[in-house]
Amino acid sequence: MITEKEFKEEVIKWAEKIGVEPKEIHIREMKNKWGSCSSKGRLTFAKDLLNETSGKRAEVIVHELLHLRYPTHNRLFKALQKAYLNHQ
Ligand SMILES: [Zn+2]
């Protein structure tokens, strides 16, 4: 298990790598999903992620951060997600 502070540091590290700037990063209890991204650049992550493996956390973090740039799961979105996660 990692702390909320450590989790946010991971998000910031990934944001720098991807080149996006989340306006706000929140962690709270969520049902049925791992994260969300608002149109205003506010990211919310499920508290349960703190108990997940680093691989799972990276998957969710990269997914939500890419939404800051690409709103839909189009081909480019999927290609970039795969590329970032294969080169951690
Ligand atoms: Zn998505």
Image (cartoon, rainbow, N blue to C red):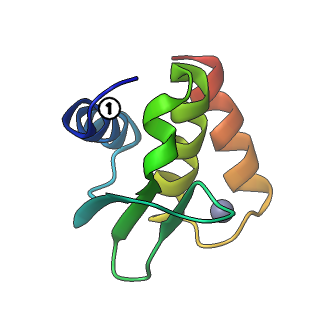
Residue 9 in the image: x percent, y percent?
Answer: 23, 34
Of residues 73 and 34, the one nearer the viewer is 34
Q: Position of 33 compared to 14: left or right?
A: right
Q: Which amino acid does label 1 sit on?
A: Glu
Residue located farthest toward the right when viewing the structure as drawn = 75
9 over 36 or under it: above or below: above
Q: Ligand 1 closer than 8 Å to the CB at disc 1?
A: no
Question: Would residue 38 be found to the left or right of residue 10 on screen?
Answer: right
Image quarter for ligand 1 equals bottom right
Question: Which residue is located at x 51 percent, y 56 percent?
Answer: 64
Identify the image quadrant of residue 10. Answer: top left
Quadrant of the drawing holding the N terminus:
top left
Q: In which quarter of the image is residue 85?
A: top right
Picture coordinates of residue 70 (x, y %)? 57, 66
Badge 1 is on which residue? 10
Q: Residue at x 26, y 40 (%)?
A: 4
